[in-house]
Image (cartoon, grey):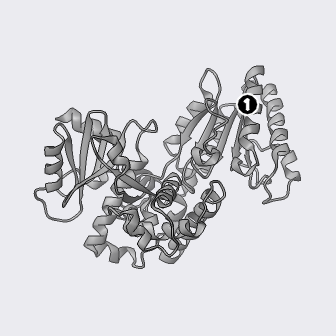
Amino acid sequence: MTDQPTYLRPLVPRLIDLLTEVGPMRLVAVTGPRQTGKTTMVLQACKELERSGRRCWYVAVDDPTPEKPPFDTAPPEAASLLPGRAPGPEWLVSTWNRARAEANRSPRGLVLALDEVQRIPNWSGIIKGLWDGDRRTGCPLRVVILGSAPWSMLTGIHESLAGRFDPFPVMHWSLEEMQRAFGVTLDEYIFFGGYPGAAIHIRDAMRWRGHIRYAIMDPVIERDILSLTRVEKPSLMRALMDLAPDYSGQVVSYRKLQGHLDDSGNTTTLARYLDLLADAGLITGLQKYSAKPHLSKRSTPKLNVLNTAVMTAGYAYPFKRVRDDGAFWGRLCESAVGAHLHNTLPPDRIVQLRYWRDEAREVDFVLASGRQVLAIEVKSGRRRGRIAGLEAFEGRFPGAKRLVVGTGGVPLNEFLSEPADFWLEEAHRAR
């Protein structure tokens, strides 16, 4: 395996382009699931910007006395704060004002990166006022905001920064990225998932499972969801997080989930909690595909983890034994395909990801954008043959295309190398 810091994700050049583009400046919001390399990516982008003559300041709000990063250091006044203690609004205003002064002195302005900014009370309202002031004066200060949760979870429904930021979502690592950075095989990626921080532990099952649980899953619940959103039944949220990955790849009613949970909660509460888990990059509930959108919203969800590590971390058996378990490995492969499709959907939501079922006939995944519809079936076994679900779907929805992934179709590693919209467009272009 190679060291993670030496690998530059394809997102790094895109972030650099965004921070150096000509025209009206906007805030850049770098958000996404925990431990997907957001901080490393921003540090790498800042290092490249420094090499080109642009100054950068990086400040971790939850630890404002870090070691000097591999480029320009943050304001020295940050050292007066206690390590591990989140600063308040006054600190944010003071830091911003010093960054303004430095940006005005620098021939090419300044980039200020604020990591874990959500820990500052009323941060969005403060930044709105500061940013609007910079736009009036023409201050050449560019600001990057980082957080461990999606933008919607960080800011809530009443978004004071609407129209002032460019979203920069960072999703789970792809197969290609994990192969280039850590040399994992396809089977290892399917089992261990796409968490870069956990990759160094895949030869030690106990340490790997501990990392997934205690460095990722538990903090997501406690620090990202419960501290940023209103959750009336925290114990129910935790129980749902423990239970839901076991049903990844399966269509499960909320009432069935209720029957397996000790804490009570109505179906609306469970649906909302599942949405929060999806926003945090853990597990989602896919809706059934229908030509009538209102029917999809009332459908029974199909659960799918968004990183297969979430599914296998709670599985007691080692990698080699799981690989020989045909039934579980098939569900794991299907979950890996679902996670890949979800994580690579265009951010404008023009492409939707669904499943389809009609009595005993089922299609694993359906991609839809306007009149373009693609039904996808995942096959991990050795046998080839007719696929009744795809045939039934094509009969029900004329004009829809089909795609088999795995046995008898597109090889799994090839499918995982292209985003969701590529396969949708390819299917309709080829036929």
Residue at point 49%, 67% (across, down): 240
Q: Residue furthest front?
A: 266
Q: Quadrant of residue 137?
A: top right
- Position of 40 with respect to 186 (left or right) is right
Q: Position of residue 9 (x, y in %)?
A: 51, 46
Q: Nearer the viewer, residue 224 or 420?
A: 224
- Position of 151 with respect to 64 (left or right) is left
Q: Quadrant of residue 246?
A: bottom left
> Where does the C terminus fall, quadrant-wise?
top left
Compared with residue 203, is residue 37 higher up or lower down, i.e. above or below?
above
Residue at point 65%, 31% (across, down): 52
Which residue type carries mark 1? Trp
Q: Position of residue 193 (x, y in %)?
A: 43, 61
Residue at point 76%, 50% (across, down): 68
Q: Residue furthest left?
A: 386
Q: Quadrant of residue 332?
A: bottom left
Q: Position of residue 155 (x, y in %)?
A: 64, 44
Q: Nearer the viewer, residue 367 or 195?
A: 367
Q: Which residue is mark 1?
A: 131
Residue at point 59%, 65% (across, down): 233
